[in-house]
Image (cartoon, rainbow, N blue to C red):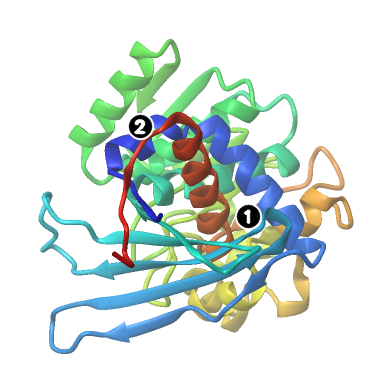
Amino acid sequence: MPLILKESEVRELLSMEDGVKLVEEAHRLHAEGGAILAPRLALSLGGEVGTYRIMAAALPGMSTFGLKTLTGVPGRRRPELTYFTILVFDGETGGFLGLLPAGHITRTRTGAAGGVAVKHMARPDSKVLGVFGAGVQARAQVAAIRIVRPIERVKIFDVVPEAAERFAADLRDDGVEAAVVGSGREAVAGSDIVTSATTSKEPVIEGEWLEPGMHVNGVGANSPAKKELAPAVFARGRVVVDYKEQVLLEAGDLIDALAAEDGIREDQIAAELGEVVAGTKPGRTADDEITVFKSVGVAFQDIATAAYVYRQAIARGMGLEVDLKG
């Protein structure tokens, strides 16, 4: 019978360490032809209501397929309601397996993708991390990056200083040296890794700020209206994306960089993350090279993660089984 899980159960079953492993494997499978993606569907709900999105993928190598739905209602989300859901299906029989809330899954897989990029692209001795943003996605980025690199110091810049202070305090409680900085330039200066997880509509990171050997993650600009990285950031770095076809349609900052005189050409995108994970293309070619990872999120990340959560729930006897045919 299909299983229904609660968000609290998903949080208990899925750690960031799990997320990094699952997202890395999903990208490897994609590079090797073991993932099938449908174009992301965005349906306007009319007026100022918002947007309904559907993301679907099949992972034969993990014997699963499914879809995620998410509803964007800017400024009007109610805490008691669910806006992200995933349906999981059995890759062998085609049968419906479970319904999962996808808030924690989305946060985890987005952070994990940034962690996988850092694992394969940033210098191994990277210890200083500059962060743009102090929300849930910025926190997920830091959590994943700390798994794959020996981060000793974190510098946080956010347009809401109080949120940045809370984030820094939480990191200090976890044994990490963390400080709030007053400008984006300060967050970048002296950092080995820079990660941006904001909803900005104007670039927050300028190309002239980058230093040799840096790695940059840009994960917040996941629609044409959002922009985090200036065109010169892409021009100065070796650019890797999570899924090229989708990034070219949705990443506002990369779209601008492809149109700008100081940006890049499409053929200068060096690889997809899966190709780097699989070892068919390099993520970094020299210690002093600047590397850039641009992400908008991919359905196979969600489905791989949700299938794992479902199987863990079955093994541990968690969730509510529902007889839909009764």
Name the kind of residue labelled 2 in the image: Val
Is residue 210 shown to the viewer in this render? no
| Residue 319 relative to residue 46: left or right | right
Residue designated by label 2: 181
Depth check: give the residue in front, 247 or 45: 45
Whether tag 1 and tag 2 are in contact, CB under 8 A, the answer is no
Is residue 120 shown to the viewer in this render? yes
Q: Which quarter of the image is occupied by the N terminus? A: bottom left
Residue 293's label in the rendered image is 1
C-alpha separation, residue under disc 1 versus residue under disc 2: 23 Å
Which residue is at 31% across, 20% downward?
Answer: 170
| Residue 33 relative to residue 253: left or right | right
Label 2 SS: loop
Residue 191 at x, y = what percent? 57, 33
The quarter of the picture where residue 173 lies is: top left
Which residue is at 52% across, 66% downward?
Answer: 95
Residue 233 at x, y = what percent? 60, 59
The quarter of the picture where residue 18 lies is: top right
Which residue is at 66% across, 27% downward?
Answer: 126
Image vertical order of residue 35 relative to residue 302, above or below: below
Q: How busy is the neighbourhood of tag 2: few (under 14 within 10 Å), some, or many (20 plus)?
A: some
Image vertical order of residue 86 relative to residue 173, above or below: below
Depth check: give the residue in front, 93 or 124: 93
Q: How busy is the neighbourhood of tag 1: few (under 14 within 10 Å), some, or many (20 plus)?
A: many
Which residue is at 30% across, 29% downward?
Answer: 167
The quarter of the picture where residue 174 lies is: top left
Counting residues from the start of the chain, the first of labels 1 and 2 encountered is: 2
